[in-house]
């Protein structure tokens, strides 16, 4: 057990030293740009993950509460619940309740318009993440080209095709390429997760909008 603990404690140190060594070998300045791409991209991903998680509520339970208030003819109470609840479903519901005395078609249009706005808010900053996904491997490939140029410069200066002369530039080229691809893969994973999360929330919004419209129609019929 002691040996297993020792191995586990050594692995992070070895990994850290390996990453630091490769970072320096790939040119600290150039690798800093790739690392910055990862940091900023992850910051946008984290912001979206927090926002999307806060946007999700128990829509069915929420609509049951709204329906109960409307059955009691307490429209202001229903508005208060919708206003004080976070997320796109609550925002759509509030817009519908604000127009509950209008024609059903007007309410439907308000729900659709608000839904489009909320969907846009859910997708905010995704374009930046996709930009960094594209930029990271591009920086890596740029490093490849620069490394090749460096190798040819070394050959020209040495006047020899000695592998030692070529090795430095080739190592720089390969390290930057690998780093750029790793950053792109990591960000792509988060990007796909965010897309799935948004699809889930949008689907929930659409289902809730249909249920909400049914509740409003029943409310109008009960008034007659």
Image (tube, rainbow, N blue to C red):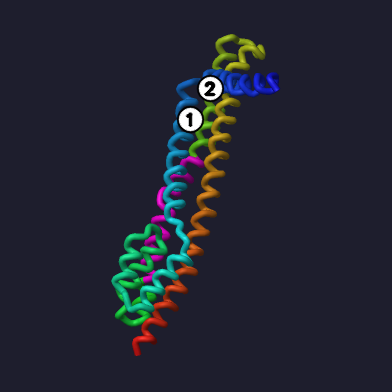
| Residue stretch in magenta | 111-134
| Front one among 140 and 38 | 38
- Name the disc covering residue 23, or none: 2
Asked whether 113 falls inside the magenta stretch, the response is yes
- Name the disc covering residue 35, or none: 1
Number of residues whose C-alpha sits closer than 10 Å to that of mark 1, classed few (under 14), some (14–19) or many (20 or more): some
Asked whether 143 falls inside the magenta stretch, the response is no
Check the image and report above or below for 88 versus 180: below
Looking at the image, which residue is at 52% across and 59% down? Answer: 200
Tell me, yes or no, whether the two marked residues, 2 and 1, touch with CB atoms within 8 Å.
yes
Please indicate whether residue 101 sits to the left or right of residue 20 in the image: left
At mark 1, the secondary structure is helix
Q: Residue furthest bottom?
A: 224
Looking at the image, which residue is at 33% across and 60% down? Answer: 84
Residue 58 at what x, y percent from top left?
Answer: 47, 61
Number of residues whose C-alpha sits closer than 10 Å to that of mark 2, classed few (under 14), some (14–19) or many (20 or more): many
Residue 1 at what x, y percent from top left?
Answer: 70, 23
Q: Residue furthest top?
A: 158
| Front one among 142 and 80 | 80
Check the image and report above or below for 1 versus 222: above
Looking at the image, which residue is at 49% across and 69% down? Answer: 207
């Amino acid at each position: 057990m002691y040996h297993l603990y020792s191995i586990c404690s050594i692995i992070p140190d070895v990994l850290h030293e390996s990453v630091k060594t490769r970072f320096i070998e790939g040119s600290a300045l150039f690798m800093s740009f790739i690392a910055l791409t990862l940091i900023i991209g992850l910051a946008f991903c984290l912001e979206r993950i927090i926002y999307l998680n806060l946007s999700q509520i128990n829509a069915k339970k929420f609509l049951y509460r709204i329906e109960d208030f409307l059955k009691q003819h307490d429209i202001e109470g229903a508005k208060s619940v919708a206003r004080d609840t976070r997320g796109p479903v609550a925002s759509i519901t509030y817009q519908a309740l604000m127009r509950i005395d209008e024609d059903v078609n007007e309410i439907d249009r308000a729900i659709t318009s608000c839904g489009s706005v909320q969907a846009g808010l859910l997708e905010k900053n995704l374009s930046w993440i996709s930009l960094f996904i594209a930029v990271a491997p591009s920086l890596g490939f740029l490093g490849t080209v620069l490394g090749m140029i460096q190798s040819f410069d070394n050959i020209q200066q040495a006047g020899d095709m000695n592998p030692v002369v070529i090795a430095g530039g080739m190592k720089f080229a390969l390290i930057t390429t690998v780093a750029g691809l790793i950053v792109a893969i990591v960000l792509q994973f988060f990007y796909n997760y965010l897309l799935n999360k948004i699809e889930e929330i949008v689907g929930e919004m659409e289902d809730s909008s249909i249920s909400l419209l049914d509740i409003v129609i029943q409310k109008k019929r009960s008034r007659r």
